[in-house]
Image (tube, helix red, strand yellow):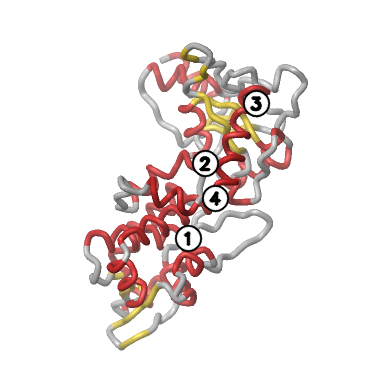
Amino acid sequence: MDWVERVRALRQWSNKGVRAPHKPLLMLYALGRFQQAPEQALPYTEVEGDLKALLHDFGPPRQTSPSYPFHHLENDGVWEVRTDSGHGSPGSGVGVLRASGARGQLVPELRSALATDPMLLWRLAHLLLDTHFPPSLHADIAAAAGLDLEAAEDARRMTVSVRDRRRAAELRREVLSAYAYRCAFCGFDGAIGRVPVGLEAAHVRWWAFRGADELHNALCLCSLHHRLFDRGVLGMDPGRRITVSDAFAGRGRAARDQVLELADRRVEDPPHGGEPVAPENIAWHTGQVFRGRPRTAVSLASVRRR
């Protein structure tokens, strides 16, 4: 059995680029729990809260139920569900999963393969992360899912092709050059000698969701603002002004100066006539990544008075 290909082929609901990472997040969670206790089944009543938190933190902005992936992942041949009455999921409803004593775990064949080949876990984990999330979120997701990926770099090289790595390096050079080696949000332009540091090429529409490796879908951002952009703390409005989520909380001066004060600031376009971010990519990020609502002028004024 080629488990890498089976996990790659997980069936997901899809509609015009709408994110639905429910099954991948459950798989990452299951792999993390396998690391801790390989043969332990996972009661739905225990998984529910953990998976709900993962979906809240790393899923799309809309609300969703952890019961759906718990039930539907069984159809992909990597996950099994049992109840007090026997084998098989009783349905996707929260109530029936709780009442039936439903518990799930990776199928026996996959558990056996993971026990035989420890590197398989790293390959599957990085496949799921690379396919469904931007690199800036990988460490946070792995930690939240209970995955220890300390030894995963070799496996990562096995799942990401040479062509993909080369294109990523080319895109970074292209984007940083187009933006004159300055963060488009804050203007940071650090370097050691002639080598830029702390600057990254950020996809606006994520590569995993058919985001193009082109300038019209990329920004040069500093490391901090890249991560906040991918977490939905920062965004852009149709006029290419920075939006700050009203869900973000920061009490210190650094949070105010480096995040809150960015609100309504004009995003820097490539200074030498390069192609700015396309409106359709901004719209995708706003709908699929940005959290909550943009802070209003009133809320910003109250922050500035503190």
Residue 93 showing in the rendered view: no
Q: Residue at x 45, y 14 (%)?
A: 305
Q: Are marks 2 and 3 in contact (CB under 8 Å)?
A: no
Q: Are marks 2 and 1 in contact (CB under 8 Å)?
A: no
Label 4 SS = loop
- Return the disc, 2 or 3, that comes first in the chain's sequence: 3
Is 67 above or below relative to 186? below
Residue type at mark 3 is Arg
Badge nearest the viewer, 1 or 3: 1
Is 134 above or below relative to 254? below
Q: Quadrant of residue 264?
A: top right
Kindly identify which numbered label has been placed on residue 161.
Answer: 4
Q: Residue at x 59, y 31 (%)?
A: 172
Q: Which residue is mark 1?
A: 22
Q: Which residue is mark 2?
A: 291
Is 154 above or below relative to 43? above
Label 1 SS = helix
Badge nearest the viewer, 3 or 4: 4
Q: Residue at x 26, y 59 (%)?
A: 35
Label 2 SS = loop
Residue type at mark 2 is Arg
* Mark-to-mark CA distance, 2 and 4: 32 Å
- Return the disc, 3 or 4, that comes first in the chain's sequence: 4
Residue type at mark 4 is Ser
